[in-house]
Amino acid sequence: MSEERNFQLLLDRDVVKFTLQGVPDRPGIAAEIFTILSSAGINVELVIQTASYADVAEISLVIKDEFVFAAEQQLQNLCPDMCARGFYRDDGIGLITLSRKNIFKMPGIAARLFRVIANLSINIELISTSFDCLTCCIRETELSKAYQALVEEFDITQIH
């Protein structure tokens, strides 16, 4: 069996993105945010922080739809307390994840995934990597198109 066939491709349509703007870049800020969210029973699927500029950053959180109202409430209370500029919510996103054990040891896989998505004129809004996964946050309306193209590119026969 080809090494390529060991890939899995996962979709998640039931997610919402929150982006916190003007978050002070100081020790403990992430702990503060995630303590508040976790104490409200909110699980964060994906988190991305931008590089700090002028001592502030943006933090994007992707959470399941079921937590959207609780998260919004917590963030409305939290942003003024931590002196963040505010946050916005984006309901029109989804996650597509290419998974394989030790994917990080496979040069060129990320380039292939990004090229397939780019060739479809799909903008990647967030990217996350781990030892076993490459995850892209894209518009929910583009998920099916990206999924089909990636199944073909990576010769995925076992659909999840």
Image: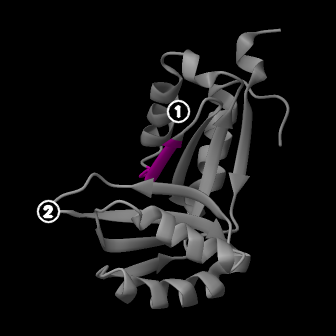
Image: 35 above or below 96: below
In the foreground, 9 or 141: 9
Q: Is residue 63 rendered to the left or right of residue 10?
A: left
**Percent of width and height locating residue 25:** 28, 62
Would you identify the image quadrant in which residue 62 lies? bottom right
Image: 151 above or below 87: above
Q: Secondary structure at mark 2?
A: loop
* Residue furthest to the left: 54
User: Which is more N-terminal, label 2 or label 1?
Assistant: 2
Which residues lie in the magenta part? Answer: 122-128
Q: List the residue tagged with mark 2.
A: 54
Res. 59 visible in picture: yes
Residue at point 46% right, 35% down? 114
- Residue 104 drawn in magenta: no
**Percent of width and height locating residue 73:** 56, 90
**Percent of width and height locating residue 72:** 55, 86
Q: Secondary structure at mark 1?
A: helix
Q: Amino acid at mark 1?
A: Leu
Q: Amino acid at mark 2?
A: Ala
Q: Quadrant of the N terminus?
A: top right
**Percent of width and height locating residue 138:** 51, 56
CB contact under 8 Å: marks 1 and 2:
no
- Residue 125 drawn in magenta: yes
Q: List the residue tagged with mark 1.
A: 113
Task: For marks 1 and 2, give the one nearer the viewer.
Answer: 2
Number of numbered discs present? 2
* Whole-number angstrom distance, CA of label 1 to CA of label 2: 33 Å
Residue at point 40% right, 66% down? 29
Residue at point 35% right, 59% down? 27
Image: 35 above or below 131: below
Q: Quadrant of the C terminus?
A: top right
Classify mark 1: residues with Cα within 10 Å, few (<14), some (14-19) or many (20+).
many
